[in-house]
Image: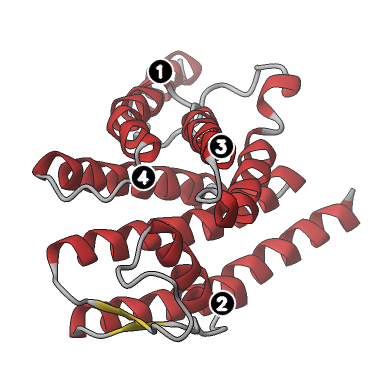
């Protein structure tokens, strides 16, 4: 009698799973085992290649291809559940439009709206991947690449935040004319500033002037330090412990 009444309870628990619950683990590992690795590789390529985006049309074209690939792979990386994939796809459309025209100096309301939706897309991807790795306790090699992808995504997201702030607030950042060939900061400058801030290296030639820009810079620097010191070390320790048990 007890066994008969346990089955409905189990079904109720299945239907009560939250938005970030994973799909059944019966998909071929060939298709699901390297999602985060692929995302990390393209994010790293994007970071390495971005200085060459403004050199010529070929560099700009490759830069746009990488941006499209990162958007697609971000959706693919969180496609553990249909509802999550649908939300990611909906947010990916404006994010893709923004990234295809990211080097244009457009201050229209539509451009600002696309930037806001791009930030929403990035935040959603970061939250889902973070939940998958650190909350659900996935400790394999691909999870390490997922954690590194989060780090890079945060850096690129803050570069968009700085770009949005620069559009909304005049003179939020100052470019030193002694080390820059242009007077107005662009997206390339903000990528450099973001990662230099997050890694606490310091961004020579660009300075946060407004209180809001300075506050965001401090927040990013703290997030970068804490993420590497606490979460990455915790994940590596868990992965090492699992490898020893196996």
In three-dimensional space, the C-alpha distance between marks 1 and 3, rounded to whole angstroms, equals 53 Å
- Element at label 4: loop
Q: Residue at x 74, y 66 (%)?
A: 237
Q: Which mark is residue 153?
A: none
N-term mark: 1 or 3: 1
N-term mark: 2 or 3: 3
Q: Residue at x 30, y 68 (%)?
A: 184
Work out whether 216 lies above or below 176: above
Expressed as whole percent of the image width and height from the top left, the position of residue 117 reads 24, 42
- Please give the residue where the numbered disc 1 appears in the rendered image: 5
Mark closer to the observer (2, 3): 3
Q: Residue at x 36, y 61 (%)?
A: 186
- Could you say which quadrant of the image residue 92 lies in? top left
Q: Which mark is residue 66?
A: 3
Work out whether 187 lies above or below 197: above
Q: Residue at x 86, y 53 (%)?
A: 243
Q: Is residue 42 visible?
A: yes
Contact between labelled residues 3 and 4, with CB atoms less than 8 Å apart: no
- Please give the residue where the numbered disc 2 appears in the rendered image: 199
In three-dimensional space, the C-alpha distance between marks 2 and 4, rounded to whole angstroms, equals 24 Å
């Amino acid at each position: 009698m007890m066994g008969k009444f346990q089955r409905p309870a189990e079904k109720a628990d299945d239907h009560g799973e939250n938005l970030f619950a994973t799909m059944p683990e019966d998909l071929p590992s060939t298709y699901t085992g390297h999602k985060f690795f692929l995302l990390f590789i393209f994010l790293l390529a994007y970071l390495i290649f971005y200085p060459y985006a403004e050199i010529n049309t070929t560099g700009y074209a490759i830069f746009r291809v990488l941006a499209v690939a990162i958007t697609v792979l971000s959706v693919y990386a969180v496609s553990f559940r249909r509802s999550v994939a649908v939300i990611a796809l909906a947010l990916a459309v404006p994010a893709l439009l923004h990234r295809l025209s990211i080097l244009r100096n457009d201050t229209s309301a539509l451009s600002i709206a696309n930037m806001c939706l791009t930030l929403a897309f990035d935040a959603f991807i970061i939250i889902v991947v973070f939940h998958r790795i650190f909350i659900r306790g996935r400790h394999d090699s691909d999870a390490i690449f997922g954690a590194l992808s989060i780090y890079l995504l945060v850096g690129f997201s803050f570069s968009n935040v700085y770009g949005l702030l620069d559009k909304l607030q005049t003179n939020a950042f100052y470019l030193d004319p002694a080390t820059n060939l242009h007077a107005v900061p662009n997206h390339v400058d903000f990528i450099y500033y973001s990662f230099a801030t997050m890694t606490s290296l310091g961004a020579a030639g660009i300075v946060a002037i407004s209180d809001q820009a300075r506050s965001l810079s401090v927040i990013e620097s703290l997030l970068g330090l804490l993420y590497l010191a606490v979460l990455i070390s915790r994940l590596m320790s868990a992965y090492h412990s699992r490898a020893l048990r196996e």
